Image (tube, rainbow, N blue to C red):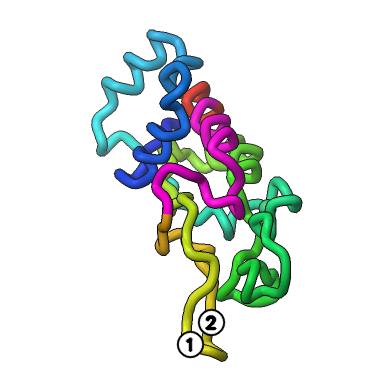
């Protein structure tokens, strides 16, 4: 069974994404939640994932809604220092795969809106890793939307 295990930063995103609606685990049954809560940390199999490098579920968000070359959009699937296109829809679509590995929890790199590109001229790279956060209340558009994050959490929680 999979349970979302988030970094403190990702928890903030979850709170932001679900602030206007029901609790994110509402889809899981009370018995399932009790089972999950009874597990100790050493019973979890944590799968760490960098969303940009996992699965591209929506090519429409690859440039994060930005126009121009890779120094404007951060997207260049031919360069390891730039966004490759992976996103939350892709991650959600591969929950069967992650569960099949035996993982019971998912921990992923920050997904918040972050600086697109930085670095000295000729040595620029993009924030595909998520660690240049500029807004802790919004999912970076390269990864999807707050609704996509909520859908991921609900799909993962529905598995336990
Ligand atoms: Ca994408």
Q: Is mark 2 within 8 Å of ligand 1?
A: no
User: Which stretch did the figure color magenta?
Assistant: 135-154
Please state if 41 lies on the left or on the right of 64 as rendered: left
| SS under mark 1 | loop
Of 132 and 92, which appears nearest the observer? 132
Of 90 and 82, which appears nearest the observer? 82
Q: Is 141 covered by the magenta stretch? A: yes
| Classed neighbour count for the residue bearing mark 2: other residues with Cα under 10 Å, few (<14), some (14–19), many (≥20) | some
Please state if 4 lies on the left or on the right of 82 as rendered: left
Give the image location of residue 160, x and y in percent.
45, 23
Give the image location of residue 38, x and y in percent.
27, 21
Q: Which mark is residue 120?
A: 1
Please state if 84 lies on the left or on the right of 46 as rendered: right
| Residue at image location 72% in from the left, 47% down from the top | 58
Q: Is 23 covered by the magenta stretch? A: no
Of 89 and 145, which appears nearest the observer? 145
All told, the count of numbered labels is 2
What residue does disc 2 label? 124
| Classed neighbour count for the residue bearing mark 1: other residues with Cα under 10 Å, few (<14), some (14–19), many (≥20) | few
The residues bearing labels 1 and 2 have C-alpha atoms spaced at a distance of 6 Å
| Residue at image location 45% in from the left, 39% down from the top | 103
Residues marked 1 and 2 touching at CB (< 8 Å): yes
- Vertical order, 119 against 33 (above or below): below
């Amino acid at each position: 069974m999979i349970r979302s295990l988030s970094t403190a930063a990702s928890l903030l995103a979850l709170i932001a994404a679900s602030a206007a609606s029901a609790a994110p685990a509402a889809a899981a049954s009370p018995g399932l939640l009790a089972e999950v809560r009874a597990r100790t940390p050493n019973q979890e199999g944590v799968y760490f994932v960098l969303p940009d490098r996992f699965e591209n579920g929506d090519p429409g968000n690859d440039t994060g809604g930005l126009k121009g070359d890779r120094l404007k959009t951060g997207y260049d699937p031919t360069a390891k220092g730039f966004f490759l296109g992976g996103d939350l829809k892709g991650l959600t679509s591969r929950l069967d795969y992650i569960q099949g590995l035996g993982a019971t929890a998912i921990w992923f790199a920050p997904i918040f809106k972050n600086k697109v590109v930085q670095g000295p001229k000729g040595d620029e790279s993009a924030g595909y890793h998520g660690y240049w956060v500029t807004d802790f209340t919004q999912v970076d558009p390269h990864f999807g939307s707050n609704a996509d994050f909520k859908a991921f959490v609900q799909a993962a929680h529905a598995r336990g």
